[in-house]
Amino acid sequence: MANNYAFIDSQNLNLGVRSLGWKLDYRKFRLYLKNKYNVSNAFMFIGYVEGNQELYTLLQKSGFILVYKNTVSHIENGKTIIKGNVDAELVLHAAAIEYPKYDKAVIVTNDGDFTCLIKYLQEHERLLRILTPNSKFSSLFKPYIKSITTMNKLRGVVEKNDRQGGRSKP
C-alpha cells in the first residue's frame, strides 16, 4: 500500500471553505485523506496564536501533525490582523524534510505561491492530488487541472454538522 502524505495550508483551507458558506469537520477530513488517498501523515501548517490551544488540540486529536509558524500582528482599519505565512515551511517539508519518507503528496491550497512545489512534485512523479478549498484557485494551477479537486465537491463528506443528535455521515 502507498505511503502518502498531505501538506495543508491551514489558513487557506479554513478561509476557502468558509467562503463557500460551510465549515470543515477536521476529523472527517482527516479520515477522507486516509481512506481516499492513503495519507498516513497529514501535516497542517498553521500560524501559532496564543490562546488557540483548544483549536490546536482539536486538530491534533483529529490526526493532523501541526507545524507552527510564528505570527506577527498589526492594526489595519482599527482591527488587529494576525499573519503567519506558512508557505516556506510547507515547501521545505514537502520538498526536503519529509520528501524521502513518502511516495506521493496531496497538497491542500489554492495559493499560486505553491506552483513551484507542485511543478517539482509533478516532474518527480510525486504529486498525487491538489485539493483546493474553493474554485477560486490560482491561474498558475491551470497546467495541473487534471490533478485538482475542489473541496466543495467533498462537502457532503467533510462538512461539519452543528446539529445536536443525528448521526453524521461516515
Image: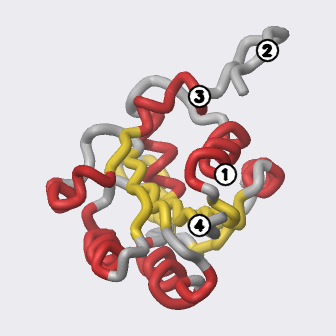
| Alpha-carbon span between mark 4 and mark 1 | 9 Å
Q: Which secondary structure, mark 1?
A: helix
Residue 59 in sight from this viewpoint: yes
Which class describes the residues within 10 Å of circle 3: few (<14), some (14-19), or many (20+)? some
Q: Quadrant of residue 93?
A: bottom right
Q: Earlier in the sequence, mark 4 or mark 1?
A: 4
Please state the total of marks drawn on the protein image.
4
Amino acid type assigned to the residue bearing label 2 in the image: Arg
Q: How is the image coloured?
A: secondary structure
Read off the residue under disc 4.
4
Residue under the image location 41 percent in, 30 percent down = 152
Read off the residue under disc 3.
157
106 to the left or right of 102: left
| Alpha-carbon span between mark 2 and mark 1 | 21 Å
Read off the residue under disc 1.
34
Q: Which secondary structure, mark 2?
A: loop
User: Closer to the camera, 142 or 18?
Assistant: 142
Q: Earlier in the sequence, mark 4 or mark 3?
A: 4
Image location (x, y in percent) of residue 126:
42, 74
Which class describes the residues within 10 Å of circle 2: few (<14), some (14-19), or many (20+)? few
Relative height, residue 154 to residue 122 (above, below): above
Read off the residue under disc 2.
167
| Alpha-carbon span between mark 4 and mark 3 | 20 Å
User: Closer to the camera, 106 or 65?
Assistant: 106
Q: Which secondary structure, mark 4?
A: strand
Amino acid type assigned to the residue bearing label 4 in the image: Asn
Q: Earlier in the sequence, mark 2 or mark 1?
A: 1
